[in-house]
Image (cartoon, rainbow, N blue to C red):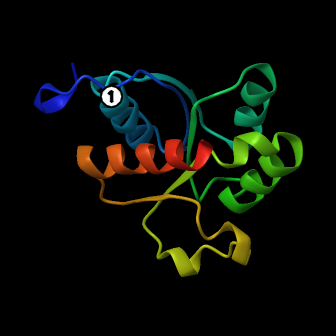
Amino acid sequence: MGPEGRTPITRLVLLVDDDVGVRTLLADMLEMLDHRVEMADTGEEALILLAARSYDVVLTDFQLPGMDGAEFYRRIEEQWPHLARRVAFVTGRAPNDLGLRSGDVSVPILGKPFSFESLEAAIAAVLARAT
């Protein structure tokens, strides 16, 4: 059971973040919410994982080394269009500062600092988009 006695549906989440502290914290929180988590620390590594399996949610930092979040999202759109609706960004930046195309503005954003509630809301927003 997750926090406050809720019984959420378990989802497979790909978590992409180069900051090991943030990645570990988010993974722990997701697992406490009864989700299964696989992790990558770069967009390139995440693309390899995406080629091997499908995920219910892709939660990615926007500021990644090498390939940033916008480029990572565009690569997902190109290679696995059905997965683009399963992406949410983790960032401390304002949504208007992300440099996304106008069609991308509906991508859910988990702002830093985050809480269990905001993490759950971001996951729910992704799942609502994916259906």
- Considering the numbered disc 1 on the image, is that residue within a helix, a strand or a loop? helix
Compared with 26, 38 (above or below) is above
Mark 1 is on which residue type? Asp
How crowded pointer 1 is (Cα within 10 Å; few <14, some 14-19, many 20+) is rated as some
Mark count: 1
* Residue most extreme to the front: 131
Image-based side of 34 in relation to 15, left or right? left
Compared with 91, 9 (above or below) is above
Return the x and y of residue 18 as percentages of the image width and height: 56, 44
Q: Quadrant of residue 105?
A: bottom right
Which residue appears at 76% of the width and 41% of the height? Answer: 82
Return the x and y of residue 7 as percentages of the image width and height: 25, 22
Which residue appears at 80% of the width and 56% of the height? Answer: 74
* Residue most extreme to the left: 4
Viewer can see residue 113:
yes
Return the x and y of residue 84 as percentages of the image width and height: 71, 48
Which residue appears at 30% of the width and 28% of the height? Answer: 33
Return the x and y of residue 44 as percentages of the image width and height: 77, 39
The residue singled out by tag 1 in the image is: 28
Image-based side of 24 in relation to 108, left or right? left
Q: Quadrant of the C terminus?
A: top right
Which residue appears at 73% of the width and 33% of the height? Answer: 45
* Residue most extreme to the right: 78
Image-based side of 80 in relation to 26, left or right? right
Q: Quadrant of residue 96?
A: bottom right
Q: Quadrant of residue 47?
A: top right
Compared with 53, 30 (above or below) is below
